[in-house]
């Protein structure tokens, strides 16, 4: 992992950032960020007065250290490069500063197993939602380290929806962290532990098939119920639609318990069954989790 990263180049570029004036230059340039169709840069004199440096030689030295990496100059204007813009995002996300103290608070969801109110905690850029009796039911790494005064309840609602975006990214074979490709999926029946979070969420975890994927580039791995993959496939999206469920508004961990589903490992792939109202969808995914076949059956006809 990380074999194609040139650590010399990374270290050199990071050292170009290691100066408070250069950080202030990046932040000042970020103030001019606009949607790309109306992008504008900053003139030398505006930038220099924004960071309030008297000594022209000193200012020139520091801006040159940033040039071609984090800042570019075009037609007399200074602009952030994409790398510069991402550094600013990380600065505002408090990745390099600020307290990583936990922020915690109740959320409006209750535990499906015991109706206890759930509690969300945001710590070191990870949100976890837990039941006092059943422990952690949801966790997700966020793209910011500090909640910046946001209510854990609203961040959880947002993160819960974002889980669908993560799933889509994995199903496109694009790692959401680094755009790398995933290695071959490992498909295996889940072995639930005591107080298994899937059981708590009212899925029958003992019959659940999980698909594991690991990014070839950055090494991040995902272990996702196979039926979640099946949800992203067109036959399932159409099936849900025909039963009044909009795929785009699904909340993967909560709110999807009004319908039944089960999954079964196959020699090379997995079979997922969904039942909604009086209809069943059986969808078979191959070893790469692509649709192999599917079949819809009315349960009324069977009687
Ligand atoms: Zn509980
Ligand atoms: Zn990756």
Image (cartoon, rainbow, N blue to C red):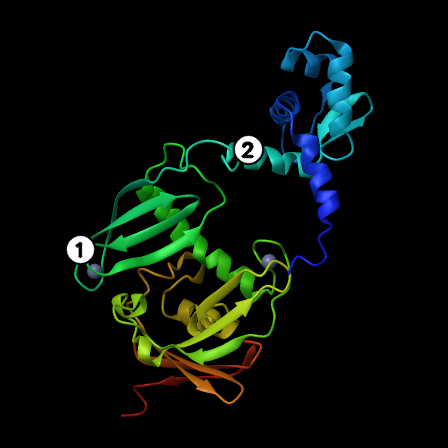
* Secondary structure under the numbered disc 1 in the rendered image: loop
- The residue carrying pointer 2 sits among few (fewer than 14), some (14 to 19) or many (20 or more) residues within 10 Å by Cα, namely some
Ligand 1 in which quarter: bottom left
Quarter location, residue 191: bottom left
Whether residues under marks 1 and 2 lie with C-beta atoms below 8 angstroms apart, the answer is no
35 left or right, relative to 156: right
Q: Residue lying farthest right?
A: 75
**Which residue is more in the foreground, 157 or 283?**
157
Q: Residue lying farthest top?
A: 54
Q: Nearer the viewer, mark 1 or mark 2?
A: 2
Q: Find out if the beta carbon at label 2 lies less than 8 Å from the nearest ligand 2 atom.
A: no
Q: Residue at x 54, y 86 (%)?
A: 268
Position of residue 247 measured from the top left corner of the image (x, y, whole percent)? 43, 62
Instruction: Report if residue 276 is visible in the image.
Output: no
Work out how far the residue at label 1 is from the one at label 2, CA to CA, in angstroms.
Answer: 37 Å
- Determine whether 212 is above or below 146 in the image: below
- Determine whether 1 is above or below 56 in the image: below
169 left or right, relative to 190: right
Q: Which residue is mark 1?
A: 116
Instruction: Report if residue 247 is visible in the image.
Output: yes
Position of residue 7 measured from the top left corner of the image (x, y, whole percent)? 71, 48
Q: Which residue is mark 2?
A: 91
* Secondary structure under the numbered disc 2 in the rendered image: helix
Q: Residue at x 64, y 26 (%)?
A: 26
Q: Find out if the beta carbon at label 1 lies less than 8 Å from the nearest ligand 1 atom.
A: yes
150 left or right, relative to 170: left
Position of residue 292 measured from the top left corner of the image (x, y, whole percent)? 55, 83
Mark nearer the N terminus (1 vs 2): 2
Quarter location, residue 217: bottom right
**Which residue is more in the foreground, 264 or 104?**
104
- The residue carrying pointer 1 sits among few (fewer than 14), some (14 to 19) or many (20 or more) residues within 10 Å by Cα, namely some
- Determine whether 55 is above or below 85 in the image: above
């Amino acid at each position: 992992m990380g074999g194609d990263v040139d650590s010399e180049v990374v270290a050199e570029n990071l050292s170009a950032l290691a100066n408070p004036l250069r950080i202030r230059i990046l932040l000042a340039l970020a103030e001019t960020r606009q949607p790309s169709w109306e992008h504008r840069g900053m003139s030398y004199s505006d930038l220099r007065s924004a960071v309030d440096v008297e000594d022209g030689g000193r200012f020139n030295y520091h801006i040159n250290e940033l040039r071609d990496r984090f800042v570019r100059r075009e037609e007399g204007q200074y602009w952030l490069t994409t790398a510069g813009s991402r550094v600013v995002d990380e600065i505002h996300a408090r990745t390099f500063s600020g307290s990583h103290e936990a922020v915690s608070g109740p959320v409006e969801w209750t535990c499906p197993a015991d109706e206890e109110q759930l509690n969300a905690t945001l710590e070191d850029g990870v949100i976890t939602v837990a039941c006092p009796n059943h422990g952690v039911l949801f966790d997700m790494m966020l793209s910011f380290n500090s909640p910046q005064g946001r209510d854990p309840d609203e961040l959880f609602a947002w993160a819960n929806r974002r889980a669908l975006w993560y799933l889509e990214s994995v199903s496109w074979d694009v790692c959401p962290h680094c755009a790398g490709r995933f290695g071959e999926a490992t498909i295996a029946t889940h072995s639930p532990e005591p107080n298994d979070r899937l059981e708590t969420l009212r899925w029958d975890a003992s019959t659940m098939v999980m698909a594991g994927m690991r990014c070839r580039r950055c090494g991040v791995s995902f272990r996702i119920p196979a039926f979640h993959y099946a949800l992203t496939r067109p036959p399932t999206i159409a099936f849900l639609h025909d039963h009044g469920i909009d795929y785009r508004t699904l909340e993967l961990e909560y709110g999807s318990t009004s319908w039944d589903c089960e999954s079964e490992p196959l020699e090379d792939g997995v079979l997922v069954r969904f039942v909604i109202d009086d209809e069943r969808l059986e969808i078979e995914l191959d070893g790469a989790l692509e649709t192999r076949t599917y079949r819809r059956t009315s349960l009324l006809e069977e009687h």
